[in-house]
Every structure is written in structure tokens, then in C-alpha cells.
Amino acid sequence: MVVQSKYQIQSDLVKSLRGVIANISNEIVAHPEKYEDLVKNGSSLLGILEANKRWARNVQRVNPEFFNKQNAGQQPTMLWIGCSDSRVPPTHITQTKPGDFFVHRNIGNAVHSLDMNANAVMQYSIDALKVKHVIVCGHYKCGAVKAGMGKNTGLPIIEQWIANIRNLDDQIHETLDKLDHELAFDLMCELNAITNARNACLTQVVQNAWKRGQPLTVHGWCYRLSTGIIEDLKFEVSNPIKAESAYQSAIQDAIQRAVNKS
Ligand SMILES: [Zn+2]
């Protein structure tokens, strides 16, 4: 009979535990989506950093050249202008990967002509990176739009930021009053996205790109939180002459869709 020493038993136990941990680790790396909740429940910075390491290991395993390519530079073909809302992360909801979108996000996916941040993002992505598409994507149940349709928030900076939404609300209040609240809210989210897409067309950066003959199309979209589907709002402009007529047409179509649903 072979009698194992205490040291040998401990050593075997450690090996066995290492095997179990390795199996769990491999399982998490192979199916990170199944363990999202585990990370969320941890809800700690440590959990996020651990999830990042697992993601990096998984990507490296599946696509060994991925990080070398990322490290070499970026060539995105699209600029995404979206809302800062935590529920609308562009790469996640479109299943695109790092490197596909240049991104600008703010409260209410706004494009203000004097916003230095938005203008700098547009200039770099259009003039330097030569993106071919600018996508202004709003979303339904947008808090900025809700605030713009409601009473004064008492927050002066926010009030200044959402002034355009209040103006829009004032301009079509007769139409909105005929719709139930949900339809009116949805319509305003669409009109806000279309208006900001039109605003993008009017910026010097986009106008100059079109003058140079650079291929560039501006789109207006709206993401529905309840289904995960992005609605194409039929605003698609590739030259300055079409911008205003496309804007009027997309606005009227959106209003008509809402009226038809009521
Ligand atoms: Zn929003």
C-alpha cells in the first residue's frame, strides 16, 4: 500500500483546484456573453477590469492579428453622432468592432453650429480620416427630448443645451397636441434626430467637404430601446442642394407616420 505524504496530498489538491479554475476561466473566455451578469453583479471597477482582460484574451485567441492592426492606426468609414444615454452604445447595438466608427456623443445627439467639440470631431473625421458617412442616431425615450417637451428643468446649462428641442416642440405643438403622449414623444425623438442630421449638413466642415467633391453622406436614424431596432428616418443627403428638401420631406414623413398610428 502506497501512503501519500501530507505534502503530496496538498500538492495534488492544488493541481486539481488549478485544473478547475483553468476550466472555469476557459469557459468564461470562450463564452463571455453568458457571464455578463456575473460581471455586472460584481458591478465593481475590479469586475470591469477583469472583464476587459477576458475580452482581450478572447480576441487575441480568436484573431491574433487584431491588436497589431489596431495599434497600427485607424481608418473608420463612419462618424457616429449619438446620445450619451448609457443604453445606446453604438458599436454594441450595431455589432461593429473597434475601429469601425469615429464617435461623438452628447446629451440628445445634438449638432450645434457653435459646439467646438462636435465641430472638431467632424473636422478630424471628415477632413483627416475621410469618413464616408455621418450617422446622426437619436433614440426613442430620449431624456433630452423629454426634458425639451416638459417644464423648465431648473438646470440652466441643460436648458441652454436643449433650447433647440424646445423650439421644435413649439413649432409643431398643434400636431403634437393631437397625438397621445407616447406617439408625440416618439415623433419628437425622430424630429430631433432629423433636425440634428440637417444641422450636420449645414456645418462648414460638411459644406466644405461637398465643395471639394468629397464623397460624404449624412443619415438620420433613431434607435428603439424597446426592440433594439434602428429606424431609418429616410434622411440621407449627399450634396448641399438636397439638404433642405430632404429635411422637409423627412419631417413630413415622420409626422405622417405618427398621425397614421394615432
Ligand atoms: Zn438620449
Image (cartoon, grey):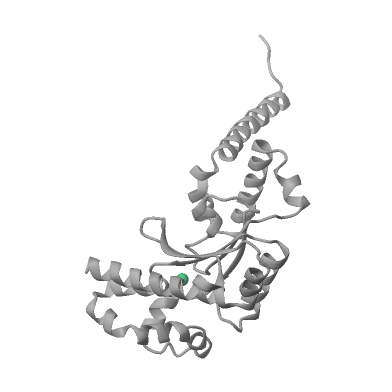
Q: In which image quadrant can residue 215 be found? A: bottom right
Q: Does residue 217 appear left or right of residue 225 in this picture?
A: right
Q: Residue furthest right?
A: 72
In this rendering, the answer to whether 245 lies above or below 87 is below
Q: Is residue 51 above or below residue 153?
A: above
Q: Position of residue 254 (x, y in %)?
A: 34, 69
Q: Nearer the viewer, residue 253 or 164?
A: 253
- Asked whether the viewer can see residue 71, the reply is yes
Quadrant showing the C terminus: bottom left
| Residue 188, quarter of the rendered image | bottom left
Relative image position of residue 81 (x, y in whole percent) = 55, 67
Residue at 66%, 64% (x, y): give it.
214
The image shows residue 218 at horizontal and vertical percentages of: 54, 66
- Residue 223 visible within the image: no
Give the residue at x 62% y 69%.
210
Extreme residue toward the top, this view: 1
Residue 18 lies left or right of residue 250; in this view the side is: right
Name which residue lies at 70% across and 26% down: 6
Q: Along the line of sight, which residue is nearer the eye, 253 or 213?
A: 213
Picture quadrant where residue 184 is located: bottom left
The residue located at (65%, 71%) in the rendering is 211
Horizontal side, residue 53 vs residue 183: left or right: right
